[in-house]
Amino acid sequence: MAKKLRKKYISSGPMPVPKWENVLVVGAGIAGLEAASQLLSLGYKVTLIDKASYAGGHVASWHKLFPDRTDASSVITGLLSSIAGATLLLSTEILSVHRLGEGFAVVLSGGETLYFKAILLATGFSLFPAEKKEEYGYGVYNQVITNSDLEQWFNEGNDPRINDRKISSVGFVHCVGSRDIKAGNPQCSKVCCITAVKQAIEIKQHFPDAEVWCFYMDLRLFGKKYEDFYISAQKDYGIHFIRGRVSEVSEAIDGEVIVKAEDTLNGRPVKIKLSLLVLMAGIISRNDIQPLAEDLSVMMDSDGFLLSRDNITGITRSQRPGIFYAGTCTGPKTIPESLAEARSAAIDIHNYLRGL
Amino acid sequence: MIYQGKQKIWSDYQKEIPDDHWFYVRSCIRQNFFPASEKYFLGICRDMLGKDIYETEHHTTCGGIAYHSDTIPQETAMTIVARQFALMTEAGYENLVASCITSFGNYTETLETWHEFPELEERIRENLWKACRREFKKPRYVAHASDLIYKFRGEIAARAKYQLVDRESGEPLRVVEHIGCHYSKMFPHKGVGGAEYPCVLSGMAEAWGGKVIDYPERRHCCGFGFRQYLVKANRGYSVSNTHKKFESMEPFHPDLIITNCPGCPYFLDRWQYVISEMTGKTYGENGYGIPVLTYEELAGLVLGIDPWDLGLQIHQVAVEPLLNKMGVPYDPETKYLGLDRKDIMKPGLPTFLKCC
């Protein structure tokens, strides 16, 4: 059987790809970079645009990546080196898109109009604005920061909210704005649990004498080595895991914060005084994606992310010919998932263009 | 504390409060607990500011206490509310202002429920017609009386004879503000400042010269909580809630507590006596308690109304330490004389709580 398939593949052979077949990749985060790299290696001309003034998306501002504590910057550097042949336009947005025959005429914010045979949307996600969960006091209490703020501190080390006080106890609140119907985001952010475990370990490494607490609804630790990481957090670092949601945060007279939660395993309320509280802001859809989706006539899903043609076999395909998806524009994903999806999308685009 | 963070939240929760022409509904219990509060609300709004505030003797209970005590079903409570709306409609008013927080919550909950379930509104209209042949228009605006005093806080400050300032030290008095649960915890957008950091009372305190204390248990229930007190077996919960609040605010040395609910000032006031008898502990200076005032009483003091005309002698906790700090004159000899100079009798003294 295998011989037969191999023979069939060799006999049909890859079709020659004309160089003029341009592909536009929207979003220069990890999915966009990886897809661009794969499309280049398949022989396409790739234009990669991003609203931001830098490439790498959210990962560019992250410090270390779970589960091996890989340098985030090395991942971005590696991806950037593989797109040397692409046209990378930063601080660039799409002003309008028009279907033109089998392709698209795209007007960019620079004023130029470019023509593409296919468009890959790798527009990524937004972090939930933690100040919306008013009861947690982000933006009201100095001692309350987000997962993103903490990564920035790991990178730069200059956040006065951390530097200006003795850190003797730190709390992490999981699921801030995710799995939260009242916040309008029922979806699980997928990466927050393991990110909290990673950040809790890193905090413990910075402040070995600090007591560290994680407040969670469920621990959704499903990836390779995640469980090991979680066990290590408890066994090697003594991090406490409390199953229960935080109800409110307030400020004590000494400048620390008091966190009230319910310990649902012990069946009792808990009240803990903390030097620092880290809110694990969840992954939500970008609020600026809807106008682009309307321009492209692609549909949004009920969770605000882009709607795939099929969530099992067609996750990288839109309902419109020539428009494809990769990464977190269709929902929360881990970095390996986003990268794998980017490769998959590149193959999908390749097959689509061969069939034109 | 990031004050700008609070201001940002406050700016998100500003409600429209019409300037004039209100149909006023009194509280069932406030006239017993704080005999002059409603009188001076009308005095400030009608006589001092010249506003049109109408009330009718046909007004009854809103049914809120019975509803929250699970002794009447919601439909009955709604029919009572519908009758109040009918009285308002018959009097030619569109704006309804409630003296009681639970009434305000009850009116708001009824309107919100009808908004979600219009068929229920139709049924209640039918019930009301069958019961008393009345019809009604829904109010355009529902406010709590503290919303109006908040709106007019600047006018009151402009006419102030005394400020919330320690006349000896020149420092602002430290004010604990306690908001009734039914003001904004059910519908945050219906309260000035929202649910987490409401500013309806803090706005008054600051406008009149005071400094608001942000203590850890400021959101906690006063101790009334309906079933905590109304069910006799639960009264331990009631006093322990109040005790928790006083323990939390004690390190901030508050000079007074301002409230906007019928139950809160009563329980925060009376339970100070009970706690002192149970534990020997008092929370004010030199063996006194912390004076607890309604917003009308505080506005009255600021405007120079005689403390005994405001009914402050009815409070359990002596208000004299506060009057001394503010420089408000008072005659100790007339404290327990009624309006007709009749002796209303001096109460017995507690064991520990100093009461002048």
Image: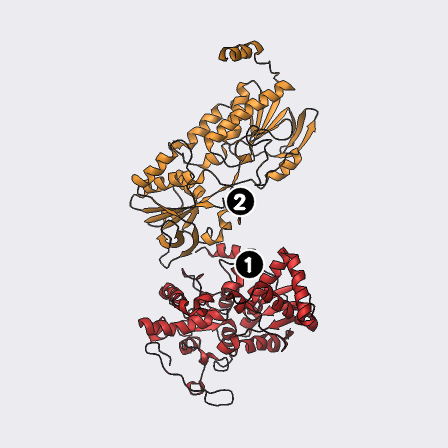
Q: Where residue A261 sits in the image (x, y, percent)?
A: 40, 53
* Disc 1: CA contacts within 10 A as few (<14), some (14-19) or many (>=20): some
- Using residue A106 as the reference point, say whether residue B99 is left or right of it: left
**Front-most of residues B209 and B124:** B124
Q: Quadrant of the C terminus of chain A?
A: top right
Q: Where residue B179 sits in the image (x, y, percent)?
A: 49, 65
Please, what is the three-letter code of the amino acid marked with disc 2? Asn
Q: Chain of mark 2?
A: A
- Using residue B172 as the reference point, say whether residue B64 is left or right of it: right
Please, what is the three-letter code of the amino acid marked with disc 1? Phe
In this rendering, the answer to whether B37 lies above or below A56 is: below
Q: Secondary structure at mark 2?
A: loop
In this rendering, the answer to whether A329 lies above or below B315 is: above
Q: Chain of mark 1?
A: B
* Chain coloured orange in the rendered structure: A
The residue that disc 1 covers is B187
Residue occupying image coordinates x 36% and y 38%: A230
Q: Where residue A302 sits in the image (x, y, percent)?
A: 59, 41
* Disc 2: CA contacts within 10 A as few (<14), some (14-19) or many (>=20): many
**Front-most of residues B312 and A58:** B312
The residue that disc 2 covers is A185
